Image: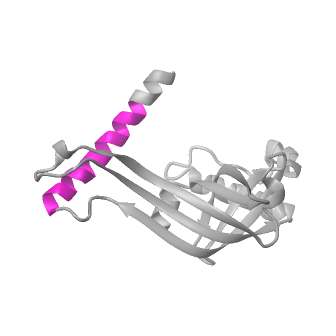
Amino acid sequence: MVEVIKTYPLATVISVVNNRPFITHLPLIYREENCKLIGHIDIYNPQAELLKEDHEVTIIFSGPQCYISPSIYATTQLPTWNYIKVHLKGTVKAIESKEALKESLITMTVFLEQPDHNYVLEPDNPIMARNLDYIKMFEITITHWEGKFKLSQDKKPQDMANARAELVRANQESIRKFLDRIF
């Protein structure tokens, strides 16, 4: 599950107040040393006010997914959908320190720029300095983990291998086709 979080860090963060859901998509970075998630949110986002002390949130990380046609199997099967998801629950704590925010933005940039590090966010970056008042930092203490890995694990080895290959192929192809349609 940690590998899913690290590989697909754009999370769906869900808060509920008075039966009204607030949903935001934010990159969250997993800190292995304390098993917490770190994130940042624009102060004008309606969910920003909810990401404070002891507020409960649900977080969803989504890995690859695709339709699996029976035609790819060596044995007779029904159509299905394969996917990888990680569902977390946790409590939020706002981090008010501007220095911690600055350090966190730099650390997140280093993580997201891997492996080539084509961009380095310098501590004295004037654009970052001008925007620190418009960004809230928070950490999430994870209280519940649930992995959803539906990858044709119940199939014979050859069918599992075929489903894996289809997951890779379908994701690459669907991204290309989608981008061709919208650009």
Query: Which percent across, then down, holds residue 5?
Result: 52, 61
Q: Residue at x 19, y 62 (%)?
A: 155
Give, as a single range, the part of the protein colored magenta: 156-176
Total numbered labels: 0
Percent position of residue 182, x then y = 51, 23
Image coloring type:
one colour
Q: Looking at the image, which is closer to me, 80 or 149?
A: 80
Residue 163 at x, y percent in the picture: 24, 52
Please tell me in which quadrant of the rendered image residue 93 appears: bottom right
Rendered residue at 62%/69% (across/down): 89
Q: Is residue 154 left or right of residue 125?
A: left
Residue 123 belongs to magenta span: no
83 left or right of 26 in image:
left
Residue 16 drawn above or below residue 69: below
Residue that appears at 54% across and 64% down: 87
Query: Principal SS element in the magenta part?
Result: helix
Please say whether residue 175 is one of the residues in the magenta stretch.
yes
Residue at horizontal 31 percent and vertical 46 percent from the top: 168
Q: Which of 34 and 56 is in front in this view?
A: 56
Q: Between 136 and 167, which is closer to the camera in this rendering?
A: 167
- Work out whether residue 113 or residue 72 is closer to the camera in this orientation and state it: 72
Residue 98 % position (x, y): 85, 60
Could you tell whether 124 is left or right of 14 in the image?
right
